Amino acid sequence: MQLTKRQQKLRALESSRNSAKKSNPTSYVNQAPFRYAERNFKSRSPPPDMTEVFDFANMDGNADVIKKRIVEVKLKSDLRGLCSLFGDSEETWRDQWDRAYVIKGVPGLVVIPNPFSPPAQRHLVRRCLRVHARHPNLSNLDTHYNMPLQGLWELVEREWRGNLKESDKDYFVSLKNIDTGGENGDSVYDEEEKDYPRQPDISSSPSLNDSQHATTPTLKLDPLPSPTVPVLSPRQLIRKLRWITLGYQYHWATKTYHLNRRVAFPEDVGDIATAVVKAVEGVGLDEEGWRNDYAGDDFRPQAGVINYYQLRDALMGHVDQSELNMQAPLVSVSLGHDCIYLMGGPTRDTKPVALRLRSGDIVVMTGESRTCFHGVPRILENTLPGHLAPEYWTHAETSEQVPDDDWRIFGEYISEARINLNVRQVFDREVGM
Ligand SMILES: O=C(O)CCC(=O)C(=O)O
Ligand SMILES: [Fe+2]
């Protein structure tokens, strides 16, 4: 993109102002370390300081202070035996299918570098857009729009193939009537920060507040639609999708689960999470006195969130503490563009570690880390792996490399996005409905 002279001048001015602010200790002196790190990685001008980022796919490239903190550990089992979506990934594995990493000073966190094959990653991206992002799963868009039952993605595909035109009656997804009753618990999405209504009011206190737990019998009113959301074409509207919920649907306003809105948990996502929880059983760091002792057989994938990030989106620091069962590990899978993932401590006063997560990487929050602050301040541009690019099939050399011919449309979406799929156990075991 060519900048005009005026734009260049404005950029330069912004950059010098920000640098001055950054070098002025008084403007940062009262800033909690987690916020300070968020601010660093969100900054566009000047660009963030990336010297202390953990990169598990490029071990030699890590700074010495980072290398010293990474400890390679063995998973309980070879992942390939646990779920058919694992296996045949690119170089990173070199046949070490039981390899993972933990970090000194970050008890409970386990990182498994991408174990998925390229087709498995494409399968998950497709499922996240075509299957999971529709009724009965709730999304941020449901508050404001009468979402089509067959899903927004179906309209996107029809528009893309030229089978849906502006003059067709179902082209524009209609806005919800503002008179529908409810409480105003949701905010309109923001270009840069994902509209998790929970973010602003999560306290930095490590103690769990009972009112945030799943069983609290609070009145769960649906949030009111906003009068200011625009009417958009399917391909524009899909870029406004920020999250959907799986299994037990989440009520953001009260930070509790809807016990009466339970959707069957998707098998492929549940299988991945269960396999991962089984694999990390017993993983720990003796020298720091921690070990994940959650039995894989006790894990039940009961709820999940899929986050859809556009390149300028961020997810601010938060703690996931709405689950009654806070002992079970939380499994989180990255797809598409790389991101910076911050993992802190029980309050924002702990300096977080910054991890570069790539497509396919899995983060598991076990034990202590389960109640710690974390967030995604930055999606890294120009990091889409070739096997997810829209034009991928045109470069394929063998027939196995050729993905389904409909990949191009998913590739177009993911070429400006990152998807995160995370799975939680809410209760101790199954809960009868
Ligand atoms: O996008 C991610 O990697 C993290 C998402 C997350 O923390 C959440 O949904 O609670
Ligand atoms: Fe989270």
Image (cartoon, grey):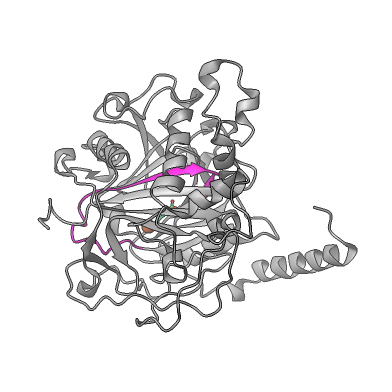
- Of all residues shown, which one is farthest toward the right? 5
Q: Which residues are magenta?
A: 319-339
- Of all residues shown, which one is farthest toward the top? 398
Rendering coords of residue 313 (x, y %): 55, 59
Of residues 165 and 401, the one drawn nearer to the viewer in this rendering: 165
Of residues 408 and 45, the one drawn nearer to the viewer in this rendering: 408
Magenta span contains residue 328: yes
Of residues 39 and 216, the one drawn nearer to the viewer in this rendering: 216
Relative vertical location of residue 5 with respect to residue 122 in this rendering, above or below: below
Q: Residue at x 45, y 78 (%)?
A: 177
The secondary structure making up most of the magenta span is: loop
Relative vertical location of residue 117 with respect to residue 5 in this rendering, above or below: above
Q: Is residue 69 visible to the viewer in this orientation of the structure? A: no
Rendering coords of residue 174 (x, y %): 51, 68
Q: Residue at x 56, y 57 (%)?
A: 234
Q: Residue at x 44, y 20 (%)?
A: 94
Q: Quadrant of the C terminus?
A: bottom left
Magenta span contains residue 55: no
66 vs 40, left or right, is: left
78 vs 148, left or right, is: left
Rendering coords of residue 246 (x, y %): 31, 53
Q: Residue at x 25, y 54 (%)?
A: 263
46 vs 12, left or right, is: left
Of residues 346 and 212, the one drawn nearer to the viewer in this rendering: 212
Relative vertical location of residue 363 with respect to residue 30 in this rendering, above or below: above
Q: Is residue 5 visible to the viewer in this orientation of the structure? A: yes
